């Protein structure tokens, strides 16, 4: 044979019958099979007599080279086995022994360090920290003796962007919430879709806005988007449904009971706004809608931020179907109602997560501009810095720059904020 010609070719010596121990192997004779017999008991087969046998399947020509039909049958068999294995591995496994993990002295101390971030000058934080060892020990004993109960919330209203009742927990209860949060975040976050951006590590309004604009650019301006949000979302959450969602992930009943202590309100429905755990509870509750839209409705460009969710790049008929299907699902499965919904063409722009967005540019909302003017008038530097950070990468930055220079406030800003404005 010439060098380089079918370097992987192997000569077929004799035919064999693999099922007969005495006549098995390539050197054994089995003359009752013709060379064109594609039966599985052929030990050796030449490539000429069976054109179906090629190097595409095995990488070798000649000896013991099966037919394509045989390879496909084996591949389908192994493929089915792999599908079954993957399905079994994807089954949700409930986690146990979380109570013991969350409420060790070590985890309570780490939870205290998390809870005091940004609050070190508050009286409640200082009071707790002065007797830190005794406070943590008392919490530990109360929790493990099942005598722990959260204290009454400190309640007050905020009016931006709309009127909301905030329920602030006592500092010791915030420590307990952080202890719970430290062990459940990964468990629940692993089930969230990538395009749910609220209250998650690596998320935020900027990420949600960037994703939205990138998806808009994939479609024609004549395509539609459908945007929906839930009416009084936090106050409408069904606590029984929420508990059932916890129990699908966690089999530790004592720990689930403790989690539910921080979802209680006097009203028959809803969870407190202001609790650390309310954030992940809200994400868990709306996660059902995310998976319904992605799996059942097969939406490609979908994004959600808390209770505002949107599908981009669909026809008018598809947008109407998505709106109706989501409304029915929210009512029947989650006891939620729409507050607003919008179906418009992409070219009209999208108002989402604090930005008015088009394919080529975006601006902050008018309310943010009003807040900037008020902050400049009252010389609230911290508010100005925050509003500049919100407007980064938008067309509003040039306008902010003119406002700040005109009011002679620009020079009062830190260098980082000044450089953001100057680089626009």
Image (cartoon, helix red, strand yellow):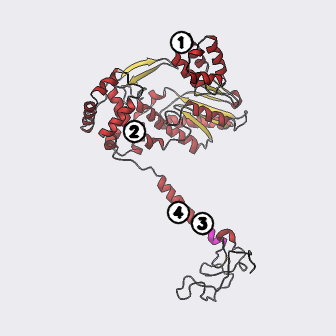
Quick one: label 4, few (<14), some, or many (20+) residues within 10 Å? few
Label 3 SS: helix
Q: Which residue is mark 1?
A: 379
Query: In terms of depth relative to the viewer, which is nearer, 251 or 122?
Result: 122
Residue 134 numbered mark, or none? none
Query: In terms of depth relative to the viewer, which is nearer, 80 or 155?
Result: 155
Q: Position of residue 140 (x, y in %)?
A: 27, 36
Q: Nearer the viewer, mark 4 or mark 2?
A: 2
Q: Which residue is mark 2?
A: 182
Quadrant location of the C terminus in the rendered image: top right
Quick one: label 2, few (<14), some, or many (20+) residues within 10 Å? some
The disc, 1 or 4, on the residue closer to the chain's N-terminal end is 4
The disc, 3 or 2, on the residue closer to the chain's N-terminal end is 3
Q: Which residue is mark 4?
A: 81
Label 4 SS: helix
The disc, 4 or 3, on the residue closer to the chain's N-terminal end is 3
Residue at 50 percent of width and 55 percent of height: 87
Q: Position of residue 223 (x, y in %)?
A: 70, 35
Query: In terms of depth relative to the viewer, which is nearer, 220 or 233?
Result: 220
Query: In terms of depth relative to the viewer, which is nearer, 360 or 218?
Result: 360
Q: Nearer the viewer, mark 3 or mark 2?
A: 2
Task: Give the magenta range.
Answer: 66-71
Whether tag 3 and tag 2 are in contact, CB under 8 A, the answer is no
Quick one: label 3, few (<14), some, or many (20+) residues within 10 Å? few
Residue 75 numbered mark, or none? 3
The disc, 1 or 2, on the residue closer to the chain's N-terminal end is 2
Label 1 SS: loop
How far is disc 3 from disc 2 in space, using C-alphas? Answer: 44 Å
| 82 vs 368: above or below | below
Residue 395: in magenta span: no
How far is disc 1 from disc 2 in space, using C-alphas? Answer: 39 Å
């Amino acid at each position: 044979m010439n060098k380089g010609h079918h370097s992987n070719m192997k000569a077929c010596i004799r035919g064999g019958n693999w099922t007969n121990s005495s006549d098995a192997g390539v050197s054994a004779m089995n003359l009752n099979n013709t060379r064109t017999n594609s039966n599985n008991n052929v030990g050796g087969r030449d490539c000429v007599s069976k054109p179906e046998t090629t190097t595409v399947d095995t990488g070798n020509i000649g000896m013991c080279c099966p037919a394509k039909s045989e390879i496909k049958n084996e591949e389908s068999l192994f493929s089915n086995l792999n599908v079954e294995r993957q399905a079994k591995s994807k089954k949700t496994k409930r986690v146990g022994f979380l109570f013991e993990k969350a409420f060790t002295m070590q985890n309570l101390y780490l939870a205290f360090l998390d809870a005091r971030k940004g609050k070190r000058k508050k009286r409640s934080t200082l009071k707790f920290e002065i007797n830190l060892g005794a406070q943590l020990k008392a919490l530990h004993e109360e929790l493990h003796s099942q005598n722990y109960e959260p204290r009454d919330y400190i309640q007050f209203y905020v009016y931006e962007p709309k009127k909301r009742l905030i329920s602030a927990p006592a500092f010791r209860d915030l420590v307990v919430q952080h202890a719970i949060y430290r062990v459940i975040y990964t468990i629940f976050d692993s089930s969230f879709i990538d395009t749910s951006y609220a209250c998650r590590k690596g998320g935020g309004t900027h990420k949600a806005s960037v994703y939205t604009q990138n998806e808009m650019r994939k479609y024609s301006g004549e395509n539609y988007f459908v945007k929906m949000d839930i009416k009084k979302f936090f106050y409408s959450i069904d606590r029984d449904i929420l508990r059932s969602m916890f129990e699908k992930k966690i089999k530790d009943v004592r720990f689930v009971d403790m989690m539910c202590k921080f979802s209680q309100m006097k009203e028959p429905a809803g969870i407190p706004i202001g609790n650390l755990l309310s954030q992940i509870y809200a994400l868990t509750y709306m996660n059902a809608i995310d998976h319904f839209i992605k799996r059942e409705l097969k939406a490609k460009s979908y994004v959600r931020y808390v209770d505002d969710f949107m599908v981009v790049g669909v026809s008018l008929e598809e947008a109407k179907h998505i709106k109706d299907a989501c409304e029915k699902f929210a009512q029947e499965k989650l006891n939620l109602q729409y507050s607003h919904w919008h179906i418009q063409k992409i070219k009209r722009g999208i108002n989402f997560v604090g930005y008015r967005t088009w394919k080529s540019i975006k601006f902050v909302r008018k309310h943010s501009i009003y807040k900037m003017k008020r902050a400049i008038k009252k010389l609230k530097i911290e508010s100005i810095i925050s509003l500049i950070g919100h407007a980064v990468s938008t067309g509003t930055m040039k306008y902010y720059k003119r406002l700040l220079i005109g009011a002679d406030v620009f020079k009062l800003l830190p260098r980082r904020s000044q450089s953001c404005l100057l680089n626009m």
